[in-house]
Amino acid sequence: MKQFTEPIIISEKQTGKKKLTADAHLNAYLLDPVSIASQRIRPAVIICPGGGYGHLSDREGEPVAMQFLSMGCHAFVLHYTLAPDEFPYPQMELAYAVSLVRAHASDWQVDPDKIIVCGFSAGGHLACSLGAFWNQEFLYSPLNLTPENIRPNGMILGYPVITSGSFCHPGSFLNLLGSAAGDETIRRLVSLEHQVGSHTPKTFLWHTSTDDAVPVKNSYLLADALTDHGVNLEMHIYPTGCHGLSLATSEVSGDDGRYIVPQCESWISLVKTWLEYF
């Protein structure tokens, strides 16, 4: 495996907002070519850990990347901008990350038509934002890119933050929007059940019914919107499990074991099948 880091630098001029925190970066994990398939191109999965746009969960980064490597995918973990920097910094960083992977498709042996964004919790909101906004000028034009440069081919969303409405996770939107958090126009813009459409890529979505931080209604609202627009969707709702499960295994468990939920471990094998028939 080849591992390296690529900087993701979005300027104040591009966002129109002063930069207050460190620049983002992309950790790359590339599988080595094997002699019998030295020219094989592979899917790439860009992972956005959660953390309410206030921190990044290590449990939802590298451990997940290792799972995608075991499936024969190249994996990337995006360390994106957090509060007090605001929208659209993280969205532009993910857009740029997708364009970077696509631009290096030949060098890195990536299939440019199988670049998938994967996100958990607020990272799921970030991933889904790109699925909703990749064809919007406010996102691609300041980066001097085209919609096709930044378009994700698929989305994998785990217990995502979606709505800024009645079932929202308030902290995520406060961190993402900062002083604009009370502006109803921008709140609707980032309430993604209103922004996805027929242009949104095929999606794998999972959540738990007992999530007490990001209500499962977020996923139901997204699923309704995606199906209304004819977007290909696979969705799994597990009957039990707390927020932030990641892989739901001992690999990502805290000391109290609450993130070990064997019933939810199947999502990663279901994603493997989804990718095989992508």
Image (spheres, rainbow, N blue to C red):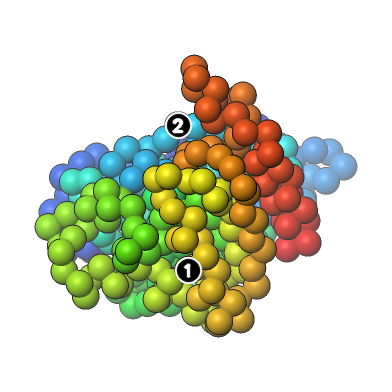
Question: Which residue is the extreme one toward the top?
Answer: 255
Q: Nearer the viewer, residue 91 or 272?
A: 272
Single out the residue that lies furthest toward the right: 36
Judge by depth and name the residue closer to the eye, 111 or 250.
250
Contact check, label 2 and label 1, Cβ < 8 Å: no
> In this rendering, does residue 170 appear at all?
yes
In the displayed structure image, the side of residue 119 where residue 88 appears, left or right? left
Percent x, y of residue 265: 67, 38
Say which of 148 and 210 sits in front. 210
The C terminus sits in image quarter: bottom right
Q: Does any portion of residue 96 appear in the rendered image? A: no
**Quadrant of image for the N terminus:** top right
Secondary element type, mark 2: helix
Identity of the residue drawn at 60% across and 64% down? 203
Distance from disc 2 to disc 1, alpha carbons, whole Å, reads 28 Å
Q: In the rendered view, does 237 fall on the left or right side of 49?
A: right
Q: Which of labels 2 and 1 is toward the front?
A: 1
SS state under label 1: helix
Instruction: Name which residue lies at 71% across and 43% down.
Output: 266
- Identity, as a three-letter code, of the amino acid under mark 2: Asp
Q: Mark 1, residues whose alpha carbon is within 10 Å: few (<14), some, or many (≥20)?
A: some
Indicate the position of residue 47 as horizontal and vertical percent values: 51, 47
Q: Which quadrant of the figure has residue 56?
A: top left
Q: Quadrant of residue 6?
A: top left
Q: Which mark is residue 221?
A: 1
Q: Which residue is labeled 2 in the image?
A: 58
* Residue at point 37%, 60% (across, down): 167
Residue drawn at (42%, 44%) of the image? 212
Badge 1 amino acid: Leu
Q: Residues within 10 Å of mark 2 (few under 14, many from 20)?
A: some
